[in-house]
Image (spheres, grey):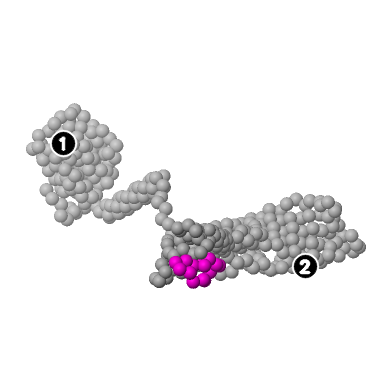
Amino acid sequence: MTAQTGTFAHDSRCRPGLLASPKFGTNGGGCPRRRCAGHAGPACNHRPNTRAWGNHLFRTAICLGLVTALACTSCNRPAAASTDAAQPRVEKVSHSPVELVLTVEPGRVNLDQDVFLNIRVTAPASVRVNLPPVDDRVTGFLFNGLIDQPPAVGNDGATVTERRVRLTPLVAPEYRIAPMAISYEDASVSPPVKGWFPTPPVRLDMSAPGNGGAVQADLTPYNIPPSARTVALWIAMALLLLLLVLGVLRLVKRLHREAVLRRLSPRERALRELDELLSQRLLEKERIKDFYLELTMIVRRYVERQHGVRAPEQTTEEFLASISRNPTFPAETTGRLKEFLESADLVKFAAFEPRPAATEAMIRTARAYLESDKGGPVAPGSKD
């Protein structure tokens, strides 16, 4: 810098911001307010470096994009792992002259997906191969059937035998397919050569559930309501059972009553039947005809049991004719029974409606005859 009056010599040191100090000040462009020797104009041509700032922002955007791409790649790794878990598990065994390929698909156990075990054996046409049973060689699975494919002939003339087994996984601590014995017989030589070899053991890992947690064995059951058809069937069965119980109870009660009546004398039984008829209150229900019919039948059944006259099966005229010839029936008794039965026939067959006093008289007549007739003792507790 050359000292001149009011000017500065222009050299490489005259840069924006070089003389930006309280002593010199700036003119807004980074140069001092005093003009340098190389600046002829009133103001300096220096401006802020905006291109450098743009380059810096561009580099920053590129870095952020790379970081975002790496983060997305990390997020996609579980999907790749699940794809690998779906790959089949393949085990190969070569035991001359037999070759075995054991395939388990998928290669990891999922509780919501069945596992398929494929046993493929390739042997010359002269070798007969026997495939082993599988149901007792699996652990943690439910044997769900198998399919044996018909033997096929390959391009090299060898016979291909294939068996496909379906396994349903259970909630278990281990999933394993134990070794199985593959037996064969080679008929190309004489005598035929027999042999066998085991399959390799296969242990499968279980895929974690979607939430990444462990499998819970104590799952909460879901309550499925029964259908309308099931509810109707239950109701019908309940009603049928109720009717059956009521029928049995009624039959037991009837048998008990018959047994009790058989132990009674004819007079006791007739008086008990009379009391049961009165307890039914048929007169109050205006069933007068039914009352008179049962009242006369009580007397007729008593005569049959006590005197041996088949009174219930006879008409009134036939009954009166029978007892008139029977010496056990006095004339007075025969007259009372004739009046009793003929009065009842008017009600039963002529639609006659008796007065209550006449009905009471009929009841007294029947009771008096049953109590006064020659026979067993009067039942205790009988009422007039």
Out of 365 and 244, give the one closest to the viewer. Answer: 244
- Picture coordinates of residue 312, whole percent (x, y): 27, 39
Are there few (<14), some (14-19), or many (20+) residues within 10 Å of tag 2? some
Q: Residue furthest left?
A: 357
- Picture coordinates of residue 35, whole percent (x, y): 46, 63
User: Which mark sits nearer the N-terminus, 2 or 1?
Assistant: 2
Q: Is residue 123 left or right of residue 277?
A: right
At x 45% / y 58%, what residue is drawn? 42
Q: Is residue 211 left or right of residue 267?
A: right
Please provide the residue range marked out in magenta: 1-15
Are circles 2 and 1 on residues that touch, CB within 8 Å? Answer: no
At x 15% / y 29%, what residue is drawn? 352
- Mark 2 or mark 1, which is nearer to you? 2
Circle 1 residue: 286
Circle 2 residue: 197
Q: Please, what is the three-letter code of the amino acid marked with disc 1? A: Glu
Question: Can residue 153 be seen in the rendering of this structure?
Answer: yes
Compared with 287, 62 (above or below) is below
Quadrant of residue 180 in the image?
bottom right
At x 18% / y 53%, what residue is drawn? 379
